[in-house]
Image (spheres, rainbow, N blue to C red):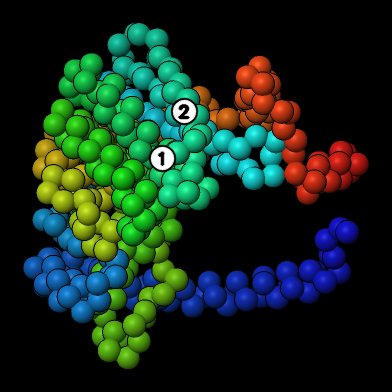
Amino acid sequence: MPVNFLNLKPQIQALAETAISRRSELNQKRTDCLALLMKHADNLILLQKTVEEASAQNKGLRCAVPVSETLTTHKSVSLPAPVCTILAADGSQINPDPHGAVLYGLVNVGVFRMQPGSGLAPEIKTFSKLIYDEDLHPSGELASEDLIALMRDVQEREILADLAQNETAPLVTLTDGPLELYHEPRNEKDFERYFKQYLSALDDLALNQVITAGYVDRPRADLVVRLLELVAPEHESTERPFAGVTDLQLFESILNPGDRSAVFKLQSSSADAFANKKALHFFYVNVGNTGQPALARVEVPLWVVEDPQAMTTLQSVLVEQSHLAGSRPYPYPLIRAHEIAVVKMDDHNQISEMIEQELLNNGLPPSFNSNKQSHKQHQARGRM
């Protein structure tokens, strides 16, 4: 049965009316929050102590912690970017389908390598890993989508760490999304095993002093906003006086094209697992143009933050490579890595057919989709 648009129309009208009033409310909150940021721009020690005290009371506190730069910092970019090597990795996956003819998973990682200004052609590599047997049934149960996603994140990082050993500095490695893993922390031993592999790969990158970063496009985070809420006068009466305001809305008025913000440390329960040189930090960068800002959050480990030249190189690479994407700025190497990694439906079907054929070759009986899946496919063909 099709969607009931008669039911939806008044709901959509109500949504639009609510959005107008909510925008006015959020604009006022943003103004108040920005004023508080300006007021406490230099009060780094006070803010650090405030977070320390608050986190002692609330172990799940998730916010920004200022490090050494004022909150209003807007460091301009230095272009062109220095000569360097860029490795960008992105991954895709096939989650196991209990209703499919064969049960398996797949992680596919694409890597794009380039040396801007060298005149050398970029290189691409693909790494495909089939997930079956014990990896598919850890602890006797079917691997969840979260666990498959963690396998993908681990493989991306391990591949970059392995390739980095054959590169010369300066080397910049980029991945899409944060360095922090939202699949963690978990109590299950299977998650813990892969998470340890992830941390080990970061250690290898640190050992080679690789400028590694996670790039988050159009972030919805409110990490700096939550920091400011801790010192807001309204904090005593309401826990979230600036609820709905994002960091992006704050820094759009601070960062000119090419600028990066101050560097902040990430305060969160899961970030505690990233110890010592792996301690997670982040900054915002405006990779857009005049009149059309485009802000991203960039997560970096401590070893990158401690190297001023590495930070300068990373900022210039991100801005320069994002400009290559035209009116929709986004780092070109990550665009290419995604194109390489994506598993299309035809690929998915071919992998399934290859597995089915190999099973037949080994004397196993033919496999079929579940009755439910067969009816779904039949209905889909009928609608076409």
Q: Residues within 10 Å of mark 1 (few under 14, many from 20)?
A: many
Q: Which residue is mark 2?
A: 129
The residue nearer to you, when weighing 67 against 133, is 133
Question: Secondary structure beneath disc 1?
Answer: helix
**Disc 2 to disc 1, C-alpha distance:** 10 Å
Mark 2 element type: strand
Which residue carries the number 1 mark?
151
The answer to whether residue 173 is above or below residue 299 is above
Q: Are marks 2 and 1 in contact (CB under 8 Å)?
A: yes
Q: In the rendered picture of this protein, how many numbered marks are placed on residues?
A: 2
Q: Amino acid at mark 2?
A: Lys
- 142 left or right, relative to 212: right
Residue drawn at (37%, 33%) of the image: 156
Q: Quadrant of the C terminus?
A: top right
Place of residue 256 in the rendered image (x, y in percent of width and height, measured from the top left): 32, 48
Of the residues shown, which amino acid type is indicated by label 1?
Answer: Met
Decide which of 155, 137 is in the foreground and name it: 137
Task: Identify the residue shown where x is 69% and y is 39%.
Answer: 100
Q: In the rendered structure, find residue 324 and report the number of the disc placed on it.
A: none
Residue farthest toward the right in the current orientation of the protein: 382
Q: Position of residue 313 (x, y in %)?
A: 22, 32
In the picture, measured across the screen, residue 153 lies left or right of residue 161, that is right
Q: Which comes sooner in the sequence, label 2 or label 1?
A: 2
Q: Name the image quarter holding the N terminus.
A: bottom right
Q: Is residue 272 above or below residue 116?
A: below
Q: Determine crowd level at label 2: few under 14, some 14-19, many 20+ residues with C-alpha closer than 10 A.
A: some
